[in-house]
Amino acid sequence: MNENDTEVMAGMLERRGLTRSYDEERADVLIFNTCSIRDHAERKVMGKLGLIGRSKRRNAIIGVTGCMANAKKESLFRKLPHVDFVLGTSNIHELDTVLDQVIAGGQTAIRTDTRFTHELDYIGASRDSKLKTSVSIIRGCDKYCTYCVVPYTRGPEVSRNPDDIVEECRQLIDQGYKELTLLGQNVNSYGNDQKDWGCHFHDLLYRLDKLPGMERIRFMTSHPVDITRELMEAVGSLDSLCEFVHFPLQAGADRVLKKMHRIYTVDEYLEKVATFRELVPNVCLGTDIIVGFPTETDAEFEETYRLMKEIEFSCAFLFEYSPRNGTPAMRWRDDVSEEVKNERLQRLLSLQEEIYAKQRQQMLGTEVEVLVERTTSRDPKYIKGRTRCWKSVVFEGAEDLVGTFQQVKLHGYSHQTLLGDRVASRS
């Protein structure tokens, strides 16, 4: 989502007459589009901004946008007086206005509304890739997980008009894009805030699948509660919809899930996993898991370990819990030591690597469809891309195959990258 917002802002600035610089020393405007999900991300931004404040670059116009802007607001000016403007996630459409204010009066500017109401010019975004890109369909979150800052930095859920989404996707297809990723903090709840539209997430997917030239659709991210049977059926039946679904578990014990306010039990989660695999046997499931959540016991962690081993996710993002200011979990003592958190994390990482190795071995000898994205950095005789289930594949081929779909027979792997030979072109 932050990358999508960055491309939208870049498009606004280019229409203003500015050009993008990849040399920090030469740039007249430096914008930090930030994330607050992890404490480490915030600390990196604050450290970088502090360095700029002690260097000659402090004469550039410096702005902070994104989730940190909403989370820290005026405190950014107090801690970093050389920052010129702060623009929240609901206010990036005001970038031009804020820049005018800073340039004209030399005064700091701040915009941090709590609800997103403005329809951004997504179509005018300056996109980094000409092959695959993202499309925002819903912003904000209403789930209020106790560890998460998103409802406070992104605000409540606001769905985007389906006609506008369809039109943006149509234009992107006409421009040659092969893969579109639908974005939202919780895409599965799309349309729930606009009952009169009569368009839920699966309805939108069926509309997009009918667009001429639509090749691949992905989506992220999901909340298990809102993953419906209708969505599962769409994944199984729509040709363009990739069979990879992010299905965050977060923890494997009911008490911890309740403390996290995840709104489902382990049994309910497993029931949906079983239904999904029954309806779509080749579906690949990804997950997020947090270890060391306040009061998590050794026995409860073992339940998480057991579930990971049982489900065998094809992709897993694993984290140690870190307290986030403004979240309900901050009220609880962070009573799991860093040593224990790290030990639990390492065990899950080792387990997931075993699962990856097993899955890679099972894929050898099979054929997969690969969207070729680029030549490899080590040898231009080899090209690289991803399968529909997000696996990275390298095989021999010329640069003119970039942007095409190739059938590849897998014969080996190196770390998490699959190796194969080209069998045929699809397009």
Image (cartoon, grey):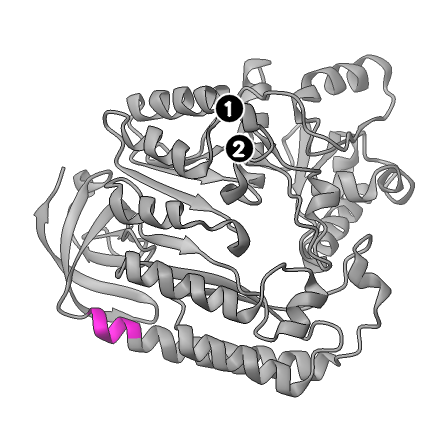
Between 92 and 19, the residue placed more toward the observer is 92
Q: Name the residue that disc number 2 marks.
A: 191
Q: Is residue 370 visible?
A: yes
250 sits left or right of 242 in the view: right
Magenta stretch in the rendered image: 359-363
Q: Quadrant of residue 359?
A: bottom left
In this view, the residue farthest toward the left is 423
423 sits left or right of 234 in the view: left
372 sits left or right of 52 in the view: left
The CA span between labels 2 and 1 is 7 Å
Quadrant containing the N terminus in the rendered view: top right
- Looking at marks 2 and 1 on the same chain, the residue that comes earlier in the sequence is marked by 2
Q: Name the residue that disc number 1 marks.
A: 197
Please tell me whether residue 277 is drawn above or below residue 174 in the rendered image: below
Please tell me whether residue 18 is drawn above or below residue 79 in the rendered image: above
> What amino acid is found at the position of numbered circle 1 in the picture?
Trp
User: Where's residue 273, x and y in %?
Assistant: 41, 64
Please name the predominant secondary structure of the magenta segment in the image. helix
Between 167 and 69, the residue placed more toward the observer is 167
Between 422 and 300, the residue placed more toward the observer is 300
Q: Is residue 392 visible?
A: no
User: Are dots 2 and 1 in contact, CB under 8 Å?
Assistant: yes
Residue 177 covered by magenta stretch: no
- Disc 1 secondary structure class: helix
Q: Tag 2: Cα neighbours inside 10 Å, few (<14), some, or many (≥20)?
A: many
Residue at point 72% right, 30% down?
115
User: Where's residue 161, x and y in %?
Assistant: 51, 23
- Disc 2 secondary structure class: loop
> What amino acid is found at the position of numbered circle 2 in the picture?
Gly
Quadrant containing the C terminus in the rendered view: top left
Residue at point 34% right, 68% down?
416
User: Where's residue 219, x and y in %?
Assistant: 43, 44
